[in-house]
Structures are given as structure tokens and as C-alpha cells.
Amino acid sequence: MRPAAIIVMGVSGSGKSTIGALLAEALGCPFADADGFHPAANVAKMASGQPLTDEDRWPWLDAIAAHIATARQAAQPVVVACSALRRAYRDRLRAGHKDLVFLHLAGEAALIAGRQAARQGHFMPPSLMASQFATLEDPAAEADAVTVSVLASPREVVTAALSQLTAAGAVAPPKADP
């Protein structure tokens, strides 16, 4: 089965954009970063240090789901980097899209904090890290989710992700190293 979309999920700073872009390259499909789907008000709210509410997130998640639907209509699988921290958010993305796979990028808070501190020019301030971890509902029990550690280099994380996605039957084995 080739999913309509692989959603690379995790807290801010887990490497969703980096891993998502490398994964899309390895699979030969487009990549989209969900940060680009946020309305300006959401970006401003996060930039000011305020966590988003569910009401802030619903239109954003609906825009991502619409992007996936457009890709599906074109018969073009896509990799999307999206935090999808809560089960309700993942369910919102799943609505009408039963062929999604979630790739959870997992890492310890200290590792993620170090990455966030080193990141330049991102609207999500490190001060919101605690709220990200508090919001995260581990998808381990969800049949359409696999988890990989982000402790290794990005290429090693992608290799592990491809291995897990292949074992889960979500993707065919890659033709070349990522």
C-alpha cells in the first residue's frame, strides 16, 4: 500500500521539516511543511509565546487535509511535516483520508531543547516547548503510526523511518540510500 500521505509528526524542534524533506526525496514525492498552512494570526500568537488552542488549530488542520486531498486527486503521494500532537488532530487529518501514515519523531526534552535553542529565525519560541510536550499524545497504540528516535543524524533517522515504514507495509523498499 502506498499511502496518500506520510505525516511526519512530533514536537517543535524534533526535525519534522528536515526529516520530512529527506524522506520525500527518498520516496520521490513532494514535501509540504504544515507551518506554511498556518494563518498569520496563529504565527503571531506563537511568536508572542502563546500556545495555540484547538480552535486555532482546526482551520489549519483542515487546510492540511485539503492539501492531502488535492495530492490524492492527482494520484501523487505527499510527505507533510505537521506536529499533529493530539489524537484529535490526527483524527481530523484522517477524516476522509484512511490511507495516511504518521511517522512520529521522538526525542527527549533535553535533546529537543538544545535543537530549539540552536534554531534561527523560526516563529516558535523555545518557551513553548513545555506546552508541546504537555500536549503530545503518543501515537504508539495507533495502527497507522510508527515511531523513530531522533537521536541519530537526519540521514540515519530517515533510514530507520524507511525501515519501519517498509516493515509496516506503508512504503516499498527504497531503491537507493536516502
Image: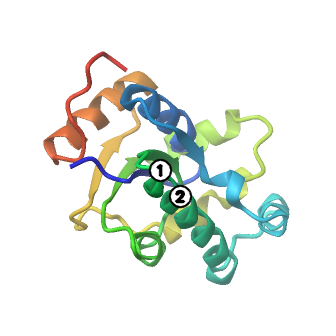
- Image coordinates of residue 25 in percent, x first then y, are 45, 27
Q: Residue, x 26% and y 61% (percent of image)?
A: 144
Whether residue 35 sits left or right of residue 121 in the image: it is left
Where is 68 relative to 32, above or below?
Answer: below
Q: Are marks 2 and 1 in contact (CB under 8 Å)?
A: yes
Residue 83 appearing in the image: no
User: In terms of depth relative to the viewer, which is nearer, 72 or 12?
Assistant: 72
Relative to the observer, which residue lies in front, 10 or 24?
24
Q: What residue is rendered at 34% in x and 40% in y? A: 149
Task: Name the side, left or right, on which 138 lies relative to 168.
Answer: right
The residue located at (35%, 64%) in the rendering is 138
Which one is in front, 177 or 175?
Answer: 175
* Residue of label 1: 74
Density class for disc 1 (Cα within 10 Å; few <14, some 14-19, many ≥20) is few
In the rendered image, the vertical position of residue 92 relative to residue 81, given as above or below: below
Q: Which quadrant would residue 66 be assigned to in this image?
A: bottom right
**Quarter assignment of residue 178:** top left
Is residue 55 shown above or below 49?
Answer: below
Q: Secondary structure at mark 1?
A: loop
Image quarter of residue 118:
top right
